[in-house]
Amino acid sequence: MSWIQLVRLIFYCALFFILVGCQGSGAETAVSQTTPISPTNTPQPTATVEPTATIEPTATHIPTAEPTATVEPTMTPTPEPTFTQLLVIQNEFKDPGGIAVDSQDRLYVWDAGHDRLVVFDSSGMELEIRDAQGSGEGEFNSLGFGGIAIDANDNLFVVDNGNFRIQKFDSEGNFVTQWGSEGQRNGQFVRAIGIAVDGAGNVYVTDDGRPEIQVFDNDGNFLRLWGSRGGDDGQFRHPTGIAVDAEGNVYVADYENKRVQKFDQEGNFLLGWGMTVDKSGTPEGIGVDANGRIYITDYDRARVEVYEPDGTFMTAWEGGENGRFNRPVAVAFDSQGNVYISNQRGNAVFKFAPPPLP
């Protein structure tokens, strides 16, 4: 190749690169001079919802419960049973004491302040009054309080404590026999108070003048006694109410010791317990219902407490629609399970429907 041809080749190569470089530079210039698309011409979202504040749940939102105080499983009390009052018998009583119900549901009330015995039917209608006063057969002389009891044959036993004796009448009210005299020997009394009859017809008598329980057969023959003065098991200070359950267990209200004592029929101590609602309460009268539950009148605290045979407290009540108890004394039951309470200071006898107990 001649040098002339070489020069031409170099010239054309240089020209080629110059042209290519110019085209690239012009393209960049064209792009840079292109009028940019204005944002106003670009379709804008009209109402763009800007996430301003997060919508907090209002009243419809239930916040997570904060643990406050742990609810302890307290001892839910057994609902108090309703003691429905059926009637109130007043009959111009004065310090009514012992009460008892026979197999025909006739109610006998010892009206101690009037030295008389009054008999009613189940509706509270008066049937009979025995009010002869004195020391003869069928006559009465009360020192206050004084119990009455009825056996399975409807024989009636009356504590005639002003005459220091027990009187027995048949179901027709006829005098049958009597026993007792004033003194401290077997078969004698100082101030007899409570009386009860067991299933065999034996008669149990308390005496707050001599702290013993005396037991007699159905005709008044002395059988045995137990007790002495004091506060130990089997001892008494002012024994008052007494009752015997179907198994022959004997319950005694130990008034001044503020407790109830339970014995077998031979007088062996089984257990004892005090009043529950108010420890200072004073047991006065005792009754045992057909289910073996023990009803105890609290003379000073004006209520009746109910227990199981083992001394477990069940419930208590303090009166009816006609007001609170006032010195409740004795308890009795009829064949329907209705409960009678003699109210000494209120001079009345209350009748309640069977309570809804277990």
Image (cartoon, rainbow, N blue to C red):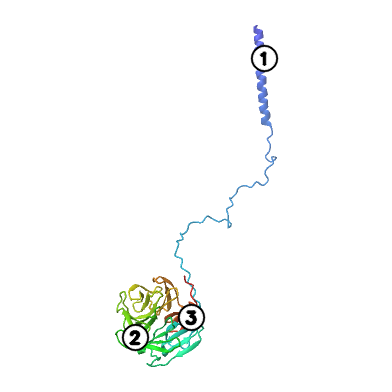
Please, what is the three-letter code of the amino acid marked with disc 1?
Tyr
State the residue position of label 1.
Answer: 12
Please, what is the three-letter code of the amino acid marked with disc 2?
Arg
Residue closest to the eye, 222 or 50:
222
Residue closest to the eye, 65 or 296:
296
Cα gap from disc 2 to disc 1, whole angstroms: 159 Å
Q: Is residue 1 above or below residue 218?
A: above
Q: Position of residue 60 (x, y in %)?
A: 58, 57
Given contact means CB atoms under 8 Å apart, are the residues at marks 3 and 2 in contact?
A: no
State the residue position of label 3.
Answer: 351
Q: Secondary structure at mark 1?
A: helix
Left or right: where 339 falls relative to 22: left
Quarter where residue 207 is shown: bottom left
Res 212 seen here: no
Mark 2 crowd level (few <14, some 14–19, many ≥20, 10 Å Cα): many
Res 24 seen here: yes
Q: Secondary structure at mark 3?
A: strand
Q: Is residue 79 above or below residue 200?
A: above
Quarter where residue 201 is shown: bottom left
Q: Residue 74: which numbered mark, if any?
A: none
